[in-house]
Amino acid sequence: MRRPWCTSGIPACTQQDEVGLSGRRVRLDAAWPDLRVAVELDGHRFHSSRVDRERDMRRDTALAA
């Protein structure tokens, strides 16, 4: 899937950028490190169960801190 920001005029991002989070390394779907901005896409295929959604919410909260 082509990311919508690729054609929107937004500056180029890094994809699958690794960052430290709670003592481990995680990958961000898209990131603008200089701006401290990241985008995570939670598609149905890998994020559909309650356990998946709860894990995603914990990760999102930790990333936002």
Image: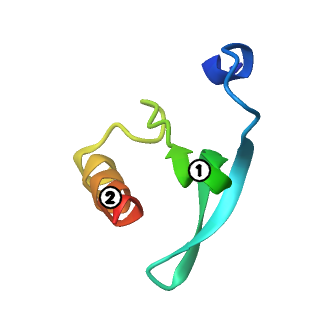
Q: Residue at x 23, y 46 (%)?
A: 50
Q: Which mark is residue 8?
A: none
- The relative height of residue 4 versus residue 56 in the rendered view (above or below) is above
Q: Residue at x 34, y 66 (%)?
A: 65
Residue that mark 2 sits on: 55
Point out the tag, 2 or 1, that comes first from the N-terminus: 1
Quadrant hosting residue 49: top left
Do the numbered discs 2 and 1 sit on residues whose CB atoms are within 8 Å?
no
Residue that mark 1 sits on: 35
Q: Is residue 21 left or right of residue 56?
A: right
Quadrant hosting residue 8: top right
Give x and y (percent) for residue 19: 61, 68
Give x and y (percent) for residue 53: 29, 47
Colour scheme employed for the rendering of this structure: rainbow
Dot 2, crowdedness within 10 Å: few (<14), some or many (≥20)?
few
Give x and y (percent) for residue 38: 54, 47
Q: Can you tell which of label 2 and label 1 is closer to the viewer? A: 1
Decide which of 21, 65 is in the foreground and name it. 65
Dot 1, crowdedness within 10 Å: few (<14), some or many (≥20)?
few
